[in-house]
């Protein structure tokens, strides 16, 4: 069905600024209102769901706005790339100008769009990101305990993160260390529970089962990779997928000359996952990845070898998910 209306919504924590245009670019209405379902419904009153395209800018609050719009029956919703969009919007930046620019870019089919995963993928991302966050807290607590031990001259081994080690740490009668150990004892069971949920889900999905056939990829990394990709069919080539993973530089080309530039628009979680996987795969004796790693390391250096393995793993992942095949060494 033909699109007759284009709506751009600039999202903020407590309010939205929206601009509605017709297909010729004429402004129909433009208002600032509270970030609620009722206010958004009132702004879009009289606009048929099937006749209107809506764009929202990528930010922390985009998922709530997207959820409201779906509940109101709107299906033509696009997520704008905030970094790319800023380069196309005029220097005179106001919330109303931003909302109108989003609608205009969509109307002219020039909007830099981002992939919107379905609710299943979003929930998996929430789970894996939560586990990452909990593990980061644990890592920080451990580092702080080791710092306190070093500060006071206490000698310790790497085997202090268990019940026996905790008992010894508490026996030191250091208030800071005792407090940190208390926090670790509380968070360890939670981390274990979340990790158990991740493993259970990873073992139940066909895509993650395929990914786990890659050397160095276990349940956790498989689910992280799958959740961040969503659908592999949005990447036309393995090169585009590797770029999205941040595992190769961008290229600036003019005429016959070209140079590598820093790639800033990539998925940091995917890059981290493949870097972890490459580290694990590189130490598996006589494996495909270890042999490749040692070959590159002998000619270049360790960081370069690790990058090459991460790139290989990303390319293999793209091919496997595209062809629905397990990892095999030919």
Image (cartoon, helix red, strand yellow):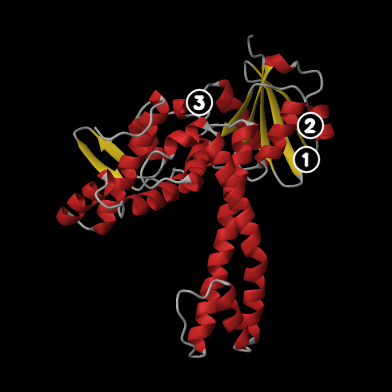
> What residue sits right under mark 2 in the picture?
40
Q: Secondary structure at mark 1?
A: loop
**Marks 3 and 2 close (CB-CB < 8 Å):** no
> Please, is residue 183 above or below residue 232 in the view?
below
Q: Pointer 1 and pointer 2: residues touching (CB < 8 Å)?
A: yes
User: Does 189 sit above or below residue 67?
Assistant: below
Q: Mark 1 — residue? A: 35
Q: Nearer the viewer, mark 3 or mark 2?
A: 2
Q: Does 78 sit left or right of 266 as displayed?
A: right
Callout 3: SS = loop
In percent of width and height, residue 294 lies at 21, 53
Q: Please, what secondary structure does the residue beneath circle 2 have? A: helix
Q: Is residue 35 left or right of residue 260?
A: right
Residue topped by disc 3: 110
At 59% from the left edge and 35% from the top edge, which residue is drawn?
Answer: 121
Q: Which mark is residue 287?
A: none
Seen at 44% across and 48% down, the residue is: 273
């Amino acid at each position: 069905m033909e699109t007759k209306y284009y709506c751009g919504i600039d999202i903020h924590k407590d309010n939205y600024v929206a601009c509605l245009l017709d297909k010729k670019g004429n402004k129909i209405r433009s208002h600032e209102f509270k970030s609620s379902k009722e206010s958004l419904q009132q702004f879009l009153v009289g606009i048929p769901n099937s006749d209107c395209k809506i764009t929202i800018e990528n930010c922390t609050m985009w998922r709530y706005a997207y959820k409201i719009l779906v509940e109101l029956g709107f299906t033509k919703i696009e997520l704008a790339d905030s970094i790319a969009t800023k380069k196309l919007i005029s220097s005179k930046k106001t919330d109303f100008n931003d909302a109108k620019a989003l609608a205009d870019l969509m109307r002219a089919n020039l909007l830099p769009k981002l992939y919107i995963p379905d609710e299943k993928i979003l929930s998996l991302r929430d789970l894996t990101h939560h586990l990452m966050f909990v593990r980061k807290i644990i890592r920080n607590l451990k580092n702080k305990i080791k710092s306190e031990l070093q500060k006071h001259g206490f000698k310790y081994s790497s085997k202090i993160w268990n019940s026996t080690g905790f008992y010894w740490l508490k026996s030191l009668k250091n208030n800071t260390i005792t407090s940190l150990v208390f926090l670790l004892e509380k968070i360890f069971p939670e981390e274990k529970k979340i990790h158990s949920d991740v493993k259970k889900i990873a073992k139940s999905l066909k895509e993650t089962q395929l990914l786990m056939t890659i050397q160095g990829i276990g349940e956790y990394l498989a689910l992280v990779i799958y959740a961040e990709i969503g659908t592999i069919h949005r990447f036309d080539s393995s090169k585009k997928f590797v770029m999205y993973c941040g595992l190769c530089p961008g290229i600036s080309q003019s005429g016959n000359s070209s140079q590598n530039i820093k790639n800033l628009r990539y998925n940091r979680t995917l890059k981290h996952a493949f870097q972890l996987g490459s580290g694990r795969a590189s130490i598996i004796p006589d494996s495909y990845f270890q042999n490749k790693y040692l070959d590159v390391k002998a000619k270049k250096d360790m960081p370069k070898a690790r990058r090459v393995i991460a790139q290989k793993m990303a390319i293999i992942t793209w091919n496997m998910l595209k062809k629905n095949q397990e990892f095999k060494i030919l």
